[in-house]
């Protein structure tokens, strides 16, 4: 019993320590007052006040419930920084409010944590699926005039939609597997979003019109009903309390490198303690063989149909390094030196699955590469 009480006190101390912002955490030019304007984000406002934007909850002295359901901030609100003593806090200026009737802003008008345009398309899409999850979904079995590639305005024929009460669908293709570089475990598969389609003539083989296409659509691609619109999340950027260490396992679009305001897939999910709003630091592992992975074909590890029908790819030889200007030395072995991982950026989690999660790159001083390390900021 005594050990249990000591453990509880220790856990409580971990969950509360450091949850107070001080003058040393502020930007040198942090304003005493700030008027929220349309287009602001919590991340952008936090950057104006704090050296570390993810410490925003400390400035407001938020608890765990407030992180998930924070007070809304609207354009026109005045934020006041209280610098009394060594601790600093943030509050809304209510001195100008009167008891007269006034119009309350809608939750939809509240500012968001990060730019909505960057993540809105990803809020309702599956993105991560199991190996067989799409096999039972309606399938495009034929195309009009035997076209190989379909786009917006094209007509396709789908099996599995007979009697459907839904008329609008999203089109997906099972993409590359998500492999944890550290454990080699398969975390799932990327569900590649291709576009949208609408039923034009029902039947045993249903005729659909493709109304939107962000990539080429092929025979064999699958359809899922368009989910109902979801409101934007009201989360606050904050650091995880538990220790998190994982890897970037994929970037949206199948690129090996990406940059700020791009989407990356992380090797950790809800079962590892990640939640919406968590901010993680990006580190470059100097010992990883990043360029060895660039010999993949244009369609990644698998072909355009999700099968191993890849286009043969022959990498071009890089010349010039054998000239007299470059001294010939033996290549550095990965295990020869314990090189430190270099921190270079931040990501913020906006959608979480069981074993993986999606995050937006908020800051990066160099390209974000697959296999880079994620850890507590």
Image (cartoon, rainbow, N blue to C red):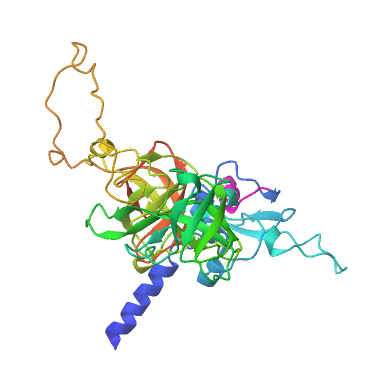
| Residue 377 shows in the view | no
Q: Residue at x 22, y 39 (%)?
A: 289
Q: Give whichever of 107, 153 is nearer the camera.
A: 153
Q: Is residue 357 highlighted in magenta?
A: no
- Which residue, as the protein is rendered here, is positioned at the far front? 145
Most common secondary structure along the magenta stretch: helix
- Position of 257 compared to 322: left or right? right
The percent coordinates of residue 159 (x first, y second) are 45, 63
Compared to residue 193, the image places residue 17 above or below, namely: below
Q: Residue at x 16, y 17 (%)?
A: 327
Q: Residue at x 60, y 45 (%)?
A: 30
The stretch of residues the image draws in magenta is 39-49
| Residue 313 shows in the view | yes
The percent coordinates of residue 245 (x first, y second) are 31, 56
Compared to residue 134, the image places residue 287 above or below, namely: above
Q: Residue at x 59, y 53 (%)?
A: 42
The percent coordinates of residue 53 (x first, y second) are 51, 51
- Position of 24 compared to 70: left or right? left
């Amino acid at each position: 019993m005594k050990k249990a009480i000591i453990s509880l006190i220790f856990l409580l101390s971990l969950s509360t320590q450091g949850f107070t912002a001080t003058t040393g955490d502020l930007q040198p030019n942090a304003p005493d007052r700030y008027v929220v304007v349309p287009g602001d984000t919590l991340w952008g406002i936090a950057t104006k006040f704090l050296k570390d934007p993810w410490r925003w909850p400390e400035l407001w002295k938020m608890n765990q419930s407030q992180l998930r359901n924070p007070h809304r901030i609207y354009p026109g609100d005045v934020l006041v920084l209280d610098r009394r003593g060594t601790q600093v806090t943030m509050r809304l200026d209510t001195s100008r409010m009167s008891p007269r009737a006034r119009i309350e802003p809608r939750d939809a008008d509240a500012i968001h944590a990060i730019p909505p345009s960057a993540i809105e398309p990803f809020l309702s899409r599956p993105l991560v699926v199991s190996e067989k999850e799409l096999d039972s979904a309606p399938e495009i079995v034929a195309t009009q005039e035997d076209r190989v590639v379909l786009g917006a305005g094209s007509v396709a024929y789908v099996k599995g939609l007979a009697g459907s009460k839904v008329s609008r669908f999203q089109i997906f293709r099972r993409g590359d597997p998500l492999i944890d570089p550290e454990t080699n475990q398969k975390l799932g598969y990327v569900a590649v979003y291709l576009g949208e389609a609408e039923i034009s003539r029902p039947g045993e083989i249903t005729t659909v019109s493709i109304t939107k296409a962000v990539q080429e659509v092929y025979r064999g691609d699958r359809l899922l009903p368009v989910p109902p619109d979801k409101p934007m999340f009201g989360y606050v950027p904050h650091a995880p309390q538990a220790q998190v260490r994982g890897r970037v396992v994929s970037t949206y679009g199948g690129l090996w490198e990406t940059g700020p305001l791009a989407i990356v897939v992380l090797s950790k999910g809800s079962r590892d303690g990640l939640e919406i709003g968590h901010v993680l630091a990006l580190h470059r592992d100097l010992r990883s063989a990043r360029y060895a992975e660039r010999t993949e074909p244009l369609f990644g590890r698998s072909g355009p149909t999700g099968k191993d029908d890849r286009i043969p790819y022959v990498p071009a030889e890089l010349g010039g390094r054998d000239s007299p200007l470059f001294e010939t030395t033996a290549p550095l072995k990965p295990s020869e030196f314990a090189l430190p991982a270099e921190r270079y950026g931040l990501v913020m989690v906006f959608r979480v699955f069981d074993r993986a999660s999606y995050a937006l790159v908020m800051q990066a001083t160099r390209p974000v590469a697959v296999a880079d390390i994620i850890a507590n900021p």
